[in-house]
Amino acid sequence: IAGITQAPTSQILAAGRRMTLRCTQDMRHNAMYWYRQDLGLGLRLIHYSNTAGTTGKGEVPDGYSVSRANTDDFPLTLASAVPSQTSVYFCASSESLNTEAFFGQGTRLTVV
Amino acid sequence: GIQVEQSPPDLILQEGANSTLRCNFSDSVNNLQWFHQNPWGQLINLFYIPSGTKQNGRLSATTVATERYSLLYISSSQTTDSGVYFCAVEGYSTLTFGKGTMLLVSP
């Protein structure tokens, strides 16, 4: 079934540890995005990628990095996790910018 | 960046009632989407509607781009409609989300 797959579904992580959230899409979409969702703040963009090989910063990029080595994969890395990065993380993709976006099922991350 | 305001923030309905959710945005947009986040956290696409009107079953949406607002109509609401409804708009680059309308439909 075509779509976006995120892994892991949930994770408890010790502060200071490194963590990579994985996102894979099989729709051959050019654009991909990472959002975090926090109570009262809605969904905020962390990083995005217009096409393979390019990335850009969103509204809340600090403490996160991304790479886009190919069309299908867009991993999000927390180099040294802090408790304020406790959140639900959503990956999304769209055919290109300004077209309909589709979301993965989310990753619930708790940093303790 | 673009500001997105949704109203009302919360809504409680009796099953079978109709409702209208509103999304105001501060600038011209190239993309507007409505999402439903169900109680399990999944974000479900409802409409991709940068302008005009669309209908899908009991749901319909209208975007008046020149006046910078969009409306989501839910008719004959069901308990399965409960959840949070998000409006998201895209100006020059990426989607900006409103804070959502939390809907509870009681039996």
Image (cartoon, coloured by chain):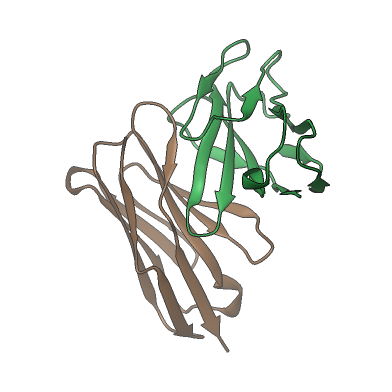
**Which color was chain B given?**
brown
* Outermost residue to the left: B67
Image vertical order of residue B54 relative to residue B95, above or below: below
The x, y position of residue A92, in whole percent, is 61, 36
Quadrant of residue B6 within the rendered picture: bottom left
Quadrant containing the N terminus of chain A is top right
The x, y position of residue A55, in whole percent, is 56, 17
Image vertical order of residue B77 relative to residue A14, above or below: below
The x, y position of residue B58, in whole percent, is 47, 69
Residue appearing at x 38%, y 75% in the figure: B19
Q: Does residue A1 show up? A: no
* Left or right: A84 in relation to B97: right
* Chain rendered green: A
* Outermost residue to the front: A16
Image vertical order of residue A51 relative to residue B98, above or below: above
Quadrant of residue B13 within the rendered picture: bottom left
* Left or right: A74 in relation to A42: right
* Left or right: B95 in relation to A47: left
